[in-house]
Amino acid sequence: MQDILDIQEQGGVMRLTLNRPERLNALNPALATALRECFQGLYRRKDIRVVILQAAGPNFCAGLDLKEQAPGKDLGAAEMMDVQHSIRDIMIAMRRCPQPIISVVQGAASGGGFALALASDIRLATPDARMNASFLRVGLTGCDMGVSYFLPRMVGSSVAAQYLLTGRFMDAQRAYSLGLVSTVAALDALNLEAQALAEDMLRTNPLGLRLTKEALGHSLDMGSLEAVMAMEDRQQILCTQSADFAEGMLAFLEKRPPNYTGR
């Protein structure tokens, strides 16, 4: 049996590949569990510094696999809530894990697939990428798995409402024009760009990288400039207490690459 989530680790980078291409990488219980447990397992792993999330085949993720796990089918409210949590907890784990997540999106990213992309820190897309909140089109609300949290913060309330209230697809060029994706290019080029981004991140202070992701996430929810800057101040002071900060300063003055140790 194939690994439904292929995990490769090399040089501080973890590559996660959704591997159900015959089902458009739709989230069945096994794949949802594998993703959730993988991201939760990253919370305290300092050896993994960057995650690249990608997919096998021509599509990123078509959302929930309705043939295996139809919402509400033969389940009561309490049981269905357990199912709901098992999926939404993937996105919570993605935001909580300290490693930046780069997603490479090709083809369809619908429903839960859209949520996976939005919960990533950087999104790269192929020209044929199409994303939508498909929940509304299968009898649910258009707001699920954190989509109604992420999307308006990224593109504004009017554009978010346009897509969440209709279930319309957003193509790659539209996503790029809105700033929802950073790059649109062929898949081979995106894989190279994802690796280049990861390598740039690996050249940074490990503590600084983790704290930067943390600050970006918390800044979405803070209510004032002063609150954000207070968090930034504390993070900077933490970094100055590390040996890596001293190494970074010395390397800059000596005009050489720093040799960070994670201390």
Image (cartoon, rainbow, N blue to C red):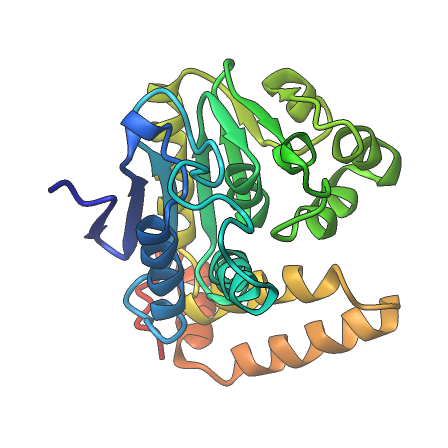
Q: Where is residue 38 in the image (x, y as percent from the top left)?
A: 33, 61
Q: Say whether residue 82 is left or right of residue 58.
A: right
Q: Can residue 167 be seen in this view?
A: yes
Q: Is residue 170 above or below residue 62?
A: above
Q: Nearer the viewer, residue 220 or 130?
A: 130
Q: Where is residue 207 in the image (x, y as percent from the top left)?
A: 46, 71
Q: Is residue 187 above or below residue 242?
A: above
Q: Which residue is drawn at 82% across and 31% down?
A: 159
Residue furthest toward the left? Answer: 1
Q: Say whether residue 199 is left or right of residue 184.
A: left
Q: Where is residue 211 in the image (x, y as percent from the top left)?
A: 55, 69
Q: Position of residue 209 (x, y in %)?
A: 49, 62
Q: Nearer the viewer, residue 58 or 211?
A: 58
Which image quadrant is residue 49 in?
Answer: bottom left
Q: Is residue 256 visible?
A: no
Q: In this view, does 158 lie above or below 33?
A: above
Q: State which quarter of the image contains the N terminus.
A: top left
Q: In this view, does 51 lie above or below 160?
A: below
Residue furthest toward the bottom? Answer: 241
Q: Say whether residue 51 is left or right of residue 181.
A: left
Label count reads 0
Q: Residue at x 31, y 56 (%)?
A: 34
Q: State which quarter of the image contains the C terminus.
A: bottom left
Residue furthest toward the front? Answer: 74
